[in-house]
Image (tube, rainbow, N blue to C red):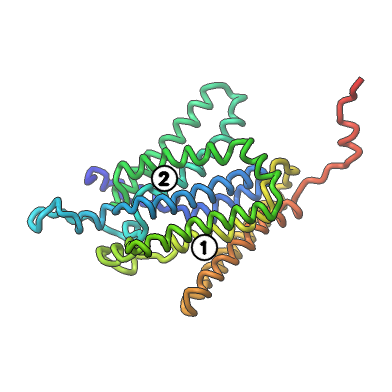
Amino acid sequence: MCNFSRYEDFLALVTKAFDPKILFLTVIPLVAGLSTRVYSRLLLSVLLTEYANTLIKWILAEDRPFWWVRETKEFTTLNRPKLYQNELTCEPSPGNPSGHLMTSTTYLYVIFSVLEEAGMQYGRTAVIVLRACYYLSLLLISVSRMYFGCHFLHQCIIGILLGIGMTKLTMSLSFEKYLTKLTRKRRLGYCSLICLILFVVYWGQKLFGVDPQWSVKMAFKWCDDPFYLDPSTTLVFSIIRLTGSLVAFAVVGPVLRSAPLDWRRSVPLTLIMMTIKWIAISYTPRYYGVIIYYLYTFLIHLLFTYGYMRLVPATASVLVDSRVQRNSRPKIN
C-alpha cells in the first residue's frame, strides 16, 4: 500500500466523495431536481441496500484492519505492524461488507443505467466507455478504502457483489409494480417489519452476550485520535436516518410515471432545500440526550424526503394541456 502514498490526497478525495452519508445528502436530492421517477428508483434502491448492509454487518461482525492488527494473535509484540491512520480510517462500524462499496455500487449502477440508456443512440462504444467508467470507479473506491485501513480486499469485493445484487432486485419493474399495488398502510407495515428485524437482531445479540456496539468500542480503543470518530457513521444512527426516509417513501409510494420537471424551477428549489437540510443537520441537538438526538435526525430525513417526492414535482412539474394530450393520442379505427 505504500506505493499509493503519492496519491493519498486523491484517494482521500475519492473516499470522501463516496461516503454514503455525503451521497445521501447530495446525489439523491440533485436527482430529485431532475427526475422524480429516477429519484424514486434511486431512493428505494439506496434505502434497501443500506438496510441490508447494516443487517449483514451485524451478523458477520468482522473486524476492520486498523483494529484487527492490534487485536489478532497472528503477530507478536516484536513484529506487530502499525497501520497509518487519519480521520478517514477510524470508522466505528463492523468491516464486512464495505458500506462505501455496497452503497456506491447502487448509486453508480442507477446513474450509469440512465446514462447508458441515453448513450445507446451513440452506439456500442459509448456503452462500453460508460461501463468501463463504472468499474473503474468501484476499483478506485476499493483502493482508497484499503489504503486508509478501513477494509480488507474481500470486504470490498463482497460489498460490490451485494450492491449489484440488491440494486438489480430493487430496480426490477416487477418489484416496483408490486410496491405500487400495495396500500399505504401495507407499505408502512413493511417498513415496520424491516425495523422489527433490525430490532430483533440488535437485542438478540445482547441476549446471547454479544455487544451490538462492540465495533464502536474497538474504534475508540485503537483509533489514534478519538476526535476522528463521527457518531453519524455508527449503525444505529444510519438506521434512524434510513427509517426517516423510508417512512416518507412508504407514505408517498414508488413513482412509476411522473410529469417532466422544469429544471429552471426544480433545480433551484432542490438546491435551496439541500442547503436548509445541511443547516438543520449542523444544528442537530447533541447535548439533550440520545432520544432527542435520534428523534430530530428521524424527523429531518422524513420531512425532506417527503419534500423531494411531493413538493418538488408539485412546484416544478411541466403542465401539459389535457386537450393537447387527447389530440396527440393515435386514433383507433
**Amino acid type, label 2:** Leu
Location of residue 255 with respect to 284 vertically, above or below: above
Task: Between residue 83 and residue 154, name the one nearer to us.
Answer: 154
- Element type at mark 2: helix
Task: Between residue 14 and residue 294, name the one nearer to us.
Answer: 294
In the rendered structure, the answer to whether residue 16 lies left or right of residue 266 reads left
Of the residues under marks 1 and 2, which one precedes in the sequence? 2
For the residues labelled 1 and 2, the Cα–Cα distance comes to 21 Å
**Amino acid type, label 1:** Ile
Indicate the position of residue 216 as horizontal and vertical percent values.
Answer: 34, 64
Front position among marks 1 and 2: 1
- The residue sitting at 58% across, 39% down in the picture is 171
- Element type at mark 1: helix
Q: Is residue 100 visible?
A: yes
Quarter of the figure with the C terminus:
top right
In the rendered structure, the answer to whether residue 127 lies left or right of residue 188 reads left
Crowdedness near tag 2: few (<14), some (14–19) or many (≥20) residues, C-alpha within 10 Å: many
| Residue holding disc 2 | 101
Indicate the position of residue 278 as horizontal and vertical percent values.
Answer: 55, 64
Crowdedness near tag 1: few (<14), some (14–19) or many (≥20) residues, C-alpha within 10 Å: many
Location of residue 52 with respect to 199 vertically, above or below: above
Quarter of the figure with the N terminus:
top left
Labelled disc at residue 240: 1
- The residue sitting at 55% across, 70% down in the picture is 295
